[in-house]
């Protein structure tokens, strides 16, 4: 098994103005701040990036801005949203390739209405998608769609498609996460979604985690990885403790909505959520800001 370099990625917010339009200036400024931290960046995601609210034209513009701002300065990847068909995913990959991103995620297939695809259907879906694009692809297996991508299917895809560049595995089943790392066999990096398993994935031989918390504290996220690389376990644990406390506060008080509000309060580009999401109340924001102050995030990020 070859040694792969640990890393961490942030799922970037998409700043909107008060009228719900993409705030391009705020988006560029936010991406520049992220790039300066050393973190990798996904854009257009369905969670932090509010990708489901974006039209095709808007998604293309988000990708275009990200590439022009980040190319050569930080890893820039397209995340997108969960598709209902292979055709939707193929169209997204074409858009991502045209924009010039380094890689794009192939999201888990979501058939809707709680339906779970059969293994042969998942194999056919990935075959069709991977066969129609040579853009470096990161396969996602995410619990939110209600099923796990079968490891035999994943193993088969890795064996047949050399342009697979990684796996994003987000699942509470640690046995499955460990199986995914073993399946990757050091050929491609494996990242978990969210910081909850951020240390566990490193212990299992994976490469790191994805987060929304990186929108506020990218340097903190990167410090966990850098401390791990040099073997400073005490510093790593301290940084990870801060990260988990920040994660808990953001999740409790509004996730991406309160992330944007917190950035605005800090004088950083954050913008506003797009409907149906609404800005958080001042009471919720005040509680998150108290956590940010208590954790002394400003000293780490050097705002």
Image: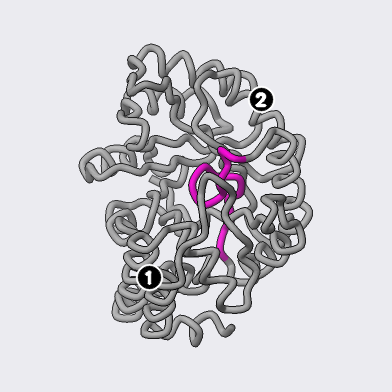
Quadrant in the picture for the N terminus: top left
Q: Residue at 38% of width from left, 54% of height from top?
A: 194
Q: Nearer the viewer, mark 1 or mark 2?
A: 1
Q: Residue at 49% of width from left, 32% of height from top?
A: 82
Measured as percent of width and height from the top left, residue 157 is found at 45, 24
Compared to residue 190, the image places residue 108 above or below, namely above
Kindly identify which residue carries mark 1.
Answer: 246
Compared to residue 164, the image places residue 74 above or below, namely below
Would residue 178 be found to the left or right of residue 76 on screen? left
Residue 273 falls within the magenta-colored stretch: no
Instruction: Tell me the quarter of the picture where residue 87 sits.
Output: top right
* Marks 1 and 2 close (CB-CB < 8 Å): no
Q: Residue at 41% of width from left, 55% of height from top?
A: 209
- How crowded pointer 2 is (Cα within 10 Å; few <14, some 14-19, many 20+) is rated as some
Q: Nearer the viewer, residue 194 or 181?
A: 194
Task: Give the mark count.
Answer: 2
Residue 8 shows in this picture: no
**Helix, strand or loop for disc 2:** helix
The mark that comes first in sequence, 1 or 2, is 2
Measured as percent of width and height from the top left, residue 172 is found at 25, 45
Where are the magenta residues, as a range? 39-53
- How crowded pointer 1 is (Cα within 10 Å; few <14, some 14-19, many 20+) is rated as many
**Helix, strand or loop for disc 1:** helix
Instruction: Tell me the quarter of the picture where residue 254 sits.
Output: bottom left
Kindly identify which residue carries mark 2.
Answer: 91
């Amino acid at each position: 098994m070859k040694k792969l370099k640990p890393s961490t990625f942030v799922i970037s917010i998409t700043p909107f103005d008060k009228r719900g339009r993409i705030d391009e200036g705020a988006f560029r400024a936010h991406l520049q701040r992220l790039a300066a931290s050393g973190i990798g960046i996904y854009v257009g995601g369905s969670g932090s990036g509010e990708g489901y609210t974006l039209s095709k034209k808007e998604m293309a513009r988000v990708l275009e801005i990200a590439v022009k701002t980040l190319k050569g300065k930080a890893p820039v990847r397209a995340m997108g949203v969960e598709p209902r068909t292979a055709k939707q995913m193929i169209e997204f990959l074409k858009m991502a390739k045209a924009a010039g991103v380094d890689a794009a995620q192939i999201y888990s297939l979501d058939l809707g209405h709680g339906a779970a695809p059969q293994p042969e259907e998942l194999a056919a879906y990935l075959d069709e998608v991977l066969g129609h694009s040579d853009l470096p692809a990161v396969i996602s297996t995410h619990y939110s769609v209600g099923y796990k991508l079968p490891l035999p299917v994943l193993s088969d895809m890795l064996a047949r498609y050399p342009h697979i560049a990684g796996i994003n595995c987000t699942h509470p089943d640690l046995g499955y996460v460990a199986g995914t790392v073993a399946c990757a066999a050091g050929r491609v990096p494996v990242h978990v979604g969210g910081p909850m398993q951020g240390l566990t994935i490193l212990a299992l031989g994976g490469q790191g985690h994805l987060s929304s918390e990186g929108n506020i504290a990218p340097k903190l996220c990167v410090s966990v990885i850098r401390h791990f690389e040099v073997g400073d376990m005490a510093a790593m644990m301290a940084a990870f403790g801060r990260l988990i406390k920040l994660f808990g506060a953001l999740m409790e008080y509004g996730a991406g909505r309160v992330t944007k509000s917190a950035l605005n309060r800090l004088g950083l580009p954050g913008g506003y959520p797009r409907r149906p999401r609404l800005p958080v109340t001042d009471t919720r924001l005040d509680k998150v800001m108290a956590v940010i102050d208590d954790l002394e995030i400003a000293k780490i990020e050097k705002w």
